[in-house]
Amino acid sequence: MPSTPPAAPSSPRTDPGSGFSTRAVWAGAAAHNPGSATVMPVSLGVTHAYDDITRWREVATGRRPGHVYSRNTNPTVEVFEAKVRALEGAEASTSFATGMAAVSSTLFAILSPGDRVVGIRDTYGGTDRIFNEFLPRWGVEVVLCDTGDTAAIEREVAAGCSVLYLETPTNPTLKVLDLRRLATAAHAAGATLVVDNTFATPVNQNPLALGADLVLHSATKFLGGHSDAMGGVVCGSEELVRRIFHYREINGASLDAMSAFLLTRGMQTLELRVERQNASAQRIAEFLSGHPAVEAVHYPGLVSHPGHEVATGQMRGFGGVLAFQVRGGNSAMEQVVTSLKLAHRAASLGSVGTLVGPPSLTSHVELTAEQRKSLGISESLVRYSVGIENVEDLLEDLERGLRAV
Ligand SMILES: Cc1ncc(COP(=O)(O)O)c(C=O)c1O
């Protein structure tokens, strides 16, 4: 059968439209893929060949767009980066092998020994280790404030720092930080504001529009959305992202093409999934708050949540993760968790399937029980990441699980 020569790949579409899902589907997509395929290829090549040495030199020295070696840039990875950039409304973006690589590369790229960084006590456990274990060893002064005390954060920032690092809502107790107010404080002190937006997703919150300088994600969670690929990403100005990209290309925590393909495929349905997860999480949080077997529920969509008003002013939805405290301590919690039929008892969050687990075994396993207690993470706290299942089924499952105690 005669074959048609493949159409030459062309440059990405520059105007993907303004609607969220329109951008999620079209941003970064090439106008023509090889062979006129409607889906982008997975560019597994590690290296890119040049017969023309002048052209090779121009690409290798950054004077002409193109690819040389996949630790630096890769065509499939570039599409993933373009999509996140479009969804976060950023000038530039770069990607990483994991969310932790995004967190650590960002901090190590923009901080120097002797600098002072202000952060909050409630961050993802891995991030907490960067602050408490690695940055101090590297000669960076770290000040972690009570997450609920915005005035204390402002005071520490005003005392001088080069970076203010926030996560909102926080993992796993869903605390909410006022990004507009803290961006003003950071900029008055000449600091760079970095925000981990993993829990909110760009569907619910765009930190750059609220004043942040850099926004980062564990793409392993909601962005990919299927628990089948790991990745991380940071977005911000050309100037900042160029420095972080350079750190990553040399230190080597680069996203691979296969993961970039899976994450990019997942991101096309991000809005559909997150809208569903927002609505289901709200129903579940309301159900749990009225349940006699539940002592406390942490979800910013609840009017009783201390951050509800701030969340309403900066988020378009409250997200798909909540945490709850089972009455009766550890054994009651274990009974509830093991009775659930529609949840993977597993680490991670943000997937199409509901994921449930105690932070003492997942996000904060690296901390001691004492350290967790000081953060309000009791051993019987349950983190519940709502999937896209039918919410009536999830409610029935939870009701059955709670009846077990
Ligand atoms: C808020 C937050 N940031 C960063 C990370 C790290 O992401 P990864 O596991 O992809 O390295 C996680 C992981 O759970 C997280 O929850």
Image (cartoon, rainbow, N blue to C red):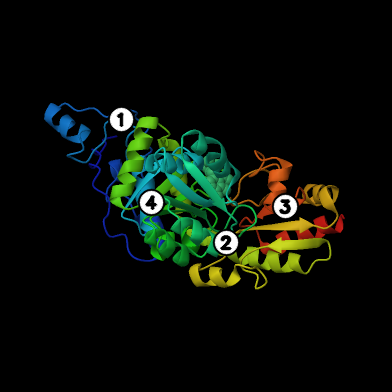
Instruction: Mark 4 and mark 2 in contact? Answer it, CB < 8 Å.
Output: no
Local crowd size for mark 2, using a 10 Å CA cut-off: few (<14), some (14–19), many (≥20): many
Q: Position of residue 364 (x, y in %)?
A: 65, 44
Q: Is residue 314 above or below residue 380?
A: below
Instruction: Mark 1 and mark 4 in contact? Answer it, CB < 8 Å.
Output: no
Q: Secondary structure at mark 4?
A: strand
Q: What residue did someone put label 4 on?
A: 235
Which disc number belongs to residue 319? 2
Instruction: Mark 2 and mark 1 in contact? Answer it, CB < 8 Å.
Output: no
Disc 1 beta carbon < 8 A from ligand 1? no
Q: Amino acid at mark 2?
A: Gly
Is 131 on the left or on the right of 76, as rendered? right
Say which of 147 and 392 sits in front. Answer: 147
Look at the image and tell me in which quarter the N terminus lies: top left
Q: Amino acid at mark 4?
A: Cys
Calculate the distance from the C-alpha at mark 2 to the C-alpha at mark 1. 37 Å
Which disc number belongs to residue 69? 1
In front: mark 1 or mark 4? 4
Residue found 67% across the figure and 52% down from its top? 375
Q: Secondary structure at mark 1?
A: loop
Say which of 291 and 224 sits in front. Answer: 291
